[in-house]
Amino acid sequence: MNTYFYEVFENIPRQGPGNNSSSRGAFQRIEKDLPAQPEILDIGCGKGVQTIQLAKLSEANITAVDNHRVFLDALKVAAVKAGYDNRIHPVNSDMTKMNFQTLFDLIWSEGAVFIIGIKEGLKQWKKYLKPCGFMVLTDLFWLTDTRPDELTRYLEEKCLYVLTVDEAIREAETQGYLCIDHFTLPLEGWTTEYFHPQKKVIRQLRKKYAGNKEAMDTFDALEYENKMFLKYHDYFGYEFLILRKHNQSQ
Ligand SMILES: C[S@@+](CC[C@H](N)C(=O)[O-])C[C@H]1O[C@@H](n2cnc3c(N)ncnc32)[C@H](O)[C@@H]1O
C-alpha cells in the first residue's frame, strides 16, 4: 500500500465497508450478557467510526488498535469531539504483536481480520478474551455456492482466500467459540458509506496527481475493486460473525 492509497483512506470516514445500524444490531445481540462497563478491544479500528459507535452504545472502555498513526490521530480528534476521549484509548500497534496484560469482555474487528486471515485471527486474539468473552468480526465470505470465474480469479490474484460463512463458523467452533449469530452487511454499507465517499475523493486526487502513473494505477485498482463488488455482490459480501469464547477454552 502506497502513499496514494493512504491518502484516499485518510480522507474518507470509513476505511472499510460498514454502517452504524449494523454495528448497533451486532452489539445489541450481546449487550445483555456484557458487564455494565465492559472492556472492549477494537482491532484495526481505522479512524474509528465503529469505535465511536460502540462508545455511544455503552459505558465501555475501548482500546482501539491500528498501525497507521494518521487514522489514530483522527480517532483521537473524533473521540474528543464526541466527549468519549476518557473512554477511548488509541494504541499504535501491529495486530500480530499486541501485548496486553488485561483481558477483554469483547473483541471487535470490522473489516480488518483479513489482514492476518480469519483462522489466524481467531487463534491469536482468543488469548486476549476473558472466559465467555465475545468476539464480533466482519470479513469477506462467499454467500452462495456459485463461483463466477472472473471473481474467483480476481480474489486469487489479490491472495484473498475467501471462506463460506458455514466454513468460518465451523472454524470458529473448532477453535473454541460458539457462534451466537451472524448476518450480512447490507449493500448500503458498501455503497453509501464506503464507495461513494471514495469515488468523490479519488476524483479530487486524480486532478491533484494528474500525470502521475503510480497514483493513477492506485486509483484504478481501487475503482476496479469497487466495480467487482457491485457486479458480484450477490455472490460475496461482508458477514458479521458474533462469537463467544467457551468458558474452558484457552
Ligand atoms: C479495512 S480497514 C478497516 C478500518 C475500520 N475498522 C473500518 O471499518 O472503518 C483495516 C484497518 O486495519 C489497519 N491495519 C492494517 N494492517 C494492520 C496491522 N498489521 N496491524 C494493525 N492494524 C492494521 C489499517 O490501517 C486499517 O485501518
Image (spheres, grey):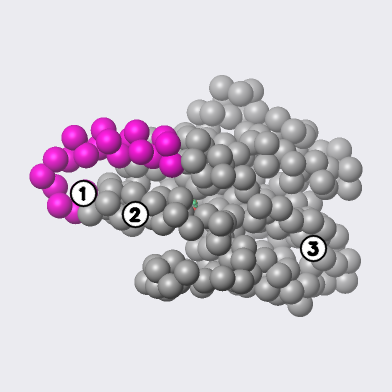
Q: Name the residue under label 3.
A: 179
Residue at 56%, 40% in the rendered image: 188
Where is residue 227 shown, x and y percent of the image?
Answer: 39, 52
Q: Is residue 151 something one can see in this rendering?
A: yes
Horizontal side, residue 11 vs residue 160: left or right:
left
Instruction: Relative to 5, say whether 55 is above or below.
Output: above
Instruction: Relative to 138, say whether 120 is above or below.
Output: below
Horizontal side, residue 169 vs residue 98: left or right:
right
Q: What residue type is labelled 3?
A: Cys
Distance between mark 2 and mark 3 Cα atoms: 33 Å
Kindly identify which numbered label has been placed on residue 216: 1
Question: SS at mark 3?
Answer: strand
Q: What residue type is labelled 2?
A: Tyr
Kindly identify which numbered label has been placed on residue 113: none
Which is in the foreground here, disc 2 or disc 3? 2
Residue 231 image-quadrant placement? bottom left
Q: Name the residue under label 2.
A: 224
Residue at 17%, 40% in the rendered image: 209
Residue neighbourhood size for the residue with mark 2, other residues' Cα within 10 Å, grouped as few (<14), some (14–19), many (≥20): few
Q: Which comes before the other along the chain, label 2 or label 3? A: 3
